[in-house]
Image (spheres, rainbow, N blue to C red):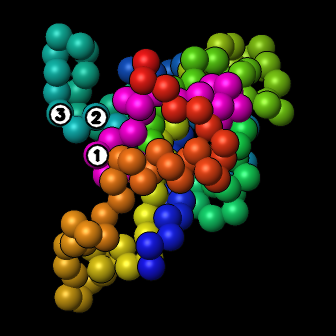
Amino acid sequence: MREIKIEKITLNIGVGQAGDKLDNAVLLLQTISNSKPIQTKTMKRIPTWGLRPRLPIGTKVTLRGKKALSLLPRLFAAVDNKLKINNFDTYGNISFGIKEYIDIPDVEYNVKIGIIGLQASITLQRAGFRIKYRKQKNAKIPNRHRITKDEAINFVKNKFNINVTEE
């Protein structure tokens, strides 16, 4: 029950506006993940930024299972197998940015897309985390069963041979 697993990987690109940039971001995520991305939309109006409700401003794709496990080493290779301690949150999840998608192995430069960066978020879980999401008798995960920051760092170091630095 204490074994840590990868629940999902979420790749996200925030563009800030609809149009060609958003179409290129969707194409990029589809190329990297071989899955269909969805568009993220604004929830409220911010006139100074030129945003209105339900305006598409980004795109994301979620990968689980074998697809996630096959993509993860490539994402770590894009950041030279180095992460900062700040990339881990208190619940053990990992988030890091990739400045240019051409840093990911086996992804070639596409003239139509140009140069775009993206964010990768990795959600970790243990057996028994389902009690948080089930419909009947849902419950909180006890503190003794949650994944801590140190456990997540050790998991990534041992399983993927990642160097975690202070800064």
User: Can see residue 109?
Assistant: yes
Q: Secondary structure at mark 1?
A: loop
The residue at which mark 3 appears reads as 44
In this view, 150 is above or below 54: below
Left or right relative to 62: residue 140: left
Q: N-terminal of the two: label 1 or label 2?
A: 2
What residue type is disc 3 on?
Lys
Q: Nearer the viewer, residue 15 or 6?
A: 6
Residue 152 inside the magenta-drawn segment: no
Mark 1 against mark 2, which lies toward the viewer? 1
Q: Which mark is residue 104?
A: none
- Kindly report the distance in space between the C-alpha atoms of the residues bearing marks 1 and 3: 29 Å
Say what amino acid the circle numbered 2 marks.
Thr
Q: Residue at 50% x, 70% y: name it.
A: 3
Q: Is residue 30 left or right of residue 55?
A: right
Of marks 1 and 3, which one's residue comes earlier in the chain? Answer: 3
Write the start and end of the magenta stretch as one range.
Answer: 76-93
For residue 90, the mark is 1
In x, y percent, where is residue 135?
26, 83
Contact? badges 2 and 3 (CB < 8 Å): yes
Quarter that holds the C terminus: top left
Residue at 19% x, 79% y: name it. Answer: 139
How many other residues sit within 10 Å of disc 3, few (<14), some (14-19) or many (≥20)?
few
Q: Nearer the viewer, mark 1 or mark 3?
A: 1
**Residue 102 x %, y %:** 73, 21
